[in-house]
Amino acid sequence: MQIVLDKNGAVPLYRQLVRQLRDQITEGRLAAHYRLPSERNLAAQLGINRTTVLQAYRQLRDEGFIASHVGKGTFVQDRAQAAPPITHNPPWPLLFSDYSNRFTYHDLASANQAQNLTGVIDFATGSPNPQAIPDELLRQVSLKAFASHDFDGQPESPIEGFPELRELLARHMRRDRAIRCEPGNIMVLSGSEQGIDLCVRAFINPGDCILVEQYTFFPALQAFRSAGARVVAVPMDGNGMRTDLLDAYCARFHPKLIYTIPTFHNPTGTTMPADRRCTLLETAMRNQCLILEDDPYGELAYATGGMGNRDIANPVVTPLKGMENSGYVVYLSTFSKTVAPGLRTGWLIADTHVVSRLAALRTLVDQHTSSSSQRICIQLLRANLVSEHVKRLRDDNAKKLEAFCTAMARYAKNRLLWSRPAGGYYVWASLPPGMHGETVLNAARRRGVSFMPGCIFDADGDDDSHVRLNFIRPELAEIDPGVRRLVASLEDVQESGCSDRT
Amino acid sequence: MQIVLDKNGAVPLYRQLVRQLRDQITEGRLAAHYRLPSERNLAAQLGINRTTVLQAYRQLRDEGFIASHVGKGTFVQDRAQAAPPITHNPPWPLLFSDYSNRFTYHDLASANQAQNLTGVIDFATGSPNPQAIPDELLRQVSLKAFASHDFDGQPESPIEGFPELRELLARHMRRDRAIRCEPGNIMVLSGSEQGIDLCVRAFINPGDCILVEQYTFFPALQAFRSAGARVVAVPMDGNGMRTDLLDAYCARFHPKLIYTIPTFHNPTGTTMPADRRCTLLETAMRNQCLILEDDPYGELAYATGGMGNRDIANPVVTPLKGMENSGYVVYLSTFSKTVAPGLRTGWLIADTHVVSRLAALRTLVDQHTSSSSQRICIQLLRANLVSEHVKRLRDDNAKKLEAFCTAMARYAKNRLLWSRPAGGYYVWASLPPGMHGETVLNAARRRGVSFMPGCIFDADGDDDSHVRLNFIRPELAEIDPGVRRLVASLEDVQESGCSDRT
């Protein structure tokens, strides 16, 4: 029996003693019926107070590990030995669910880290440039949110969000996205992805069909598939989803839901024009099929010509939700792409039937969005700070897009096929014939630049001729060298003969 | 064509005009080929600037609702008419999933509100008394969290949580719950319920069996069933789960997971003694079955006799996770029951295999817990404020338990069967023979007191002879009148002959 106590440690001596004795008993190092030293002896031996040993023995007795018999002493119990050996670990592959074994998780940030690649110019990650997050504004606003002396702790919020935040979001959406909505149509979410998860729970039975754009947000694909949905890809062109094909797809597959990112699409950067939006709405309604409109980028329009009215976020593109009020469209947006992803605050706009159903289901998930995040968002919206920040962000992003297009025109003209998006984060580029996204990515990482290979976004999973480039993620000054490195990596692949099909 | 503009409203005039014209077109009130007034005429008619009308017409043209023909004028497009009428609403019952149609949501707070019952003494709600939330402490700590001038906005957190918070939680758990763990074993959650949801995704295939205590936390039951699991109830007695039956249950049902609340159980208030914990661990390991240990109340021990050491949170009860380090136990806890539910911050302790698998799956859910909530928790733990607050809370709650027991002894002696819990929130009481929980609840609400009927917690769903009473939810002064009202409502039921079986 060996006991080593840390007399200066944070853990009380009595606890250390219990822990070590218990370990030795459960691991079989102290056998059943072993007689422990008396309290007095052990205390003397360890140079500690006798009451400490008393306390430890009492707890081990309560736990069933030892027993004391008056006049005989204290013994290790038989029972305690029966505890299984701690070296026996669970057979993880047998325990994980089929779904989680199939789950693929594209964490390029970690991949880059794992490869020890610092100094990589990042066109891959789908979140804002860290420099674009308004630190000082958030600091001021957070202080304001918590400074008031009638501050009421961190109260529970209604599941749908604090009433003031729902009101402010409804106003923001009416003004900046032309969506008719009342506070009762708004549900505050812990990020807009949560809205996808909740809609899957609320609407999808295993076997139900969901139509998606050929290329789409990959966590949505994973969420749909995890629910056992049949995911069917609708072809796209430079104007987004081919809505002329929708009728045929509805007739063939009887979809329950159409998931779409109509504005500044992820990953292709396309925007669905108004006539296609009409067709989409009309087809969905005729087929009693819901539309889940994902709009994280909608406020980030960079087209400047024409209207010249700086007060209007998106002079041209009205969301699908802004073109109907029947309830067929469930709309999702977020502050993650425009303010700060760490807020974990998004929202959903839907018919009140949907809001109340999702609220009930959310009792299984996270109850409500963090009260402190909600308070911060209330402060931001109250003072119109979101719209002001988004205006600045649009200007900065438009400069990055300009720099990106200039660099692409200069270096990539004969190598990549791409088009300039009207807003959002992404340029989608076709690789030269026979070149594969993953091959180019490996070469690109060696050159110090990263992007997302197209196959990740392909609903059919077999595309390998595209890449997604987030032009707003790097610093402005990194964009030119980033594109140069990307084109150099194409040359590397070509020269090494790694282009697989030519 | 009728246009009414709100010239003092927040919505730009141009937007109001677009909206009203679009509505009239989609609703068919402006027919296809209808000729709109010229820009000049409409501006004059409405008393607004001509460029406002110009802007509105241009947007409607871009959206495909109208078309202009030089020299002829501006006309409503045929295409626009095809948009479906807005009165056509989705057939919700056909669209909601089977799961969500089956989902029952027990929202007693709303039920009380709906019945316009103010002044109801609340033994029902499973969260802290609002007065017990340390407002001023949270205010100070929040200010501290956001005051620093090197504050870095609301950065994205790693999925598992900020490293400092994981480190602080590991220390807290080692010290106050005797759980051996390193920061790598900790995952910060948006409430501990999220841990249940993630474990279901990670481990449960449809048809897998999950063993639960006969009475248990009802959102866990719903989460398990929604995943298509077979939920099997293990009988309980005054010491919690009957672990002597576990071998037979494992042989018969081959469970993948055992879900348990071993300490200050919800709803029964029981605590599983150490020997049962050994049996449970041993049986689970022998059967390669995971244990999901839910421990939201573990720090709230009110037993004061014996140890007399106020530095030790729970002198007696060691969590299951503290008795093994093989990885079979996944442990969940939360600040919701001890600090403030609005923080939406809980945590999980598990083998690193589990942490990394759950982190991957969490990319479909909420990415990570709100950065501001995490910062606040870091401040709380850094200065040891959680343990200090929990000590005060234990004292307050112990007084409430004392008052509750006194009142029960005084008023309910011959009517309810119950036992005093050693900690946590709940007293579980048996109703007089033949009386039903729901019947008593209706009578109780009329008397101005509420509780949770037992059937909600019953894994088999057919119990109606118990009630759960959260003795810490009301104010101290409300406890005596609350119990009195409860007993009066039992008399009401008896007198009205509503007791269904006698």
Image (cartoon, coloured by chain):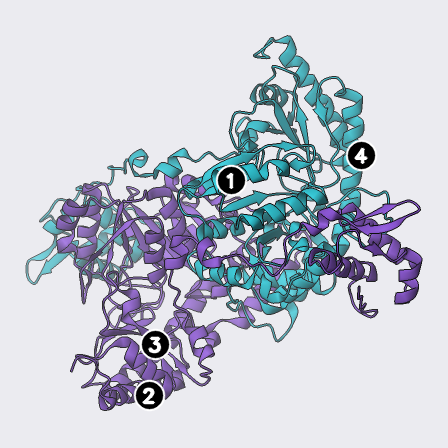
Chain colours: A cyan, B purple
**Residue shown at 46%/84% (left/top)?**
B118
- From the image, state whether disc 2 or disc 1 is nearer to you: 1
Q: Measure the alpha-carbon separation of dots 3 and 1.
A: 51 Å
- Asked which secondary structure carries label 1, the reply is helix
Quickly name the residue at label 4. Answer: A402
What is the chain letter for disc 2?
B
Quickly name the residue at label 2. Answer: B485
Q: Position of residue B346 (x, y in %)?
A: 44, 56
Q: Position of residue A384 (x, y in %)?
A: 74, 61
Q: Given the image, on which type of amino acid does mark 1 rest?
A: Ala
Q: Position of residue A303 (x, y in %)?
A: 80, 42
Quickly name the residue at label 1. Answer: A251
**Residue shown at 39%/69% (left/top)?**
B126
Res A12 visible = no
Residue B274 sits in quarter: bottom left
Circles 2 and 1 on the same subunit: no
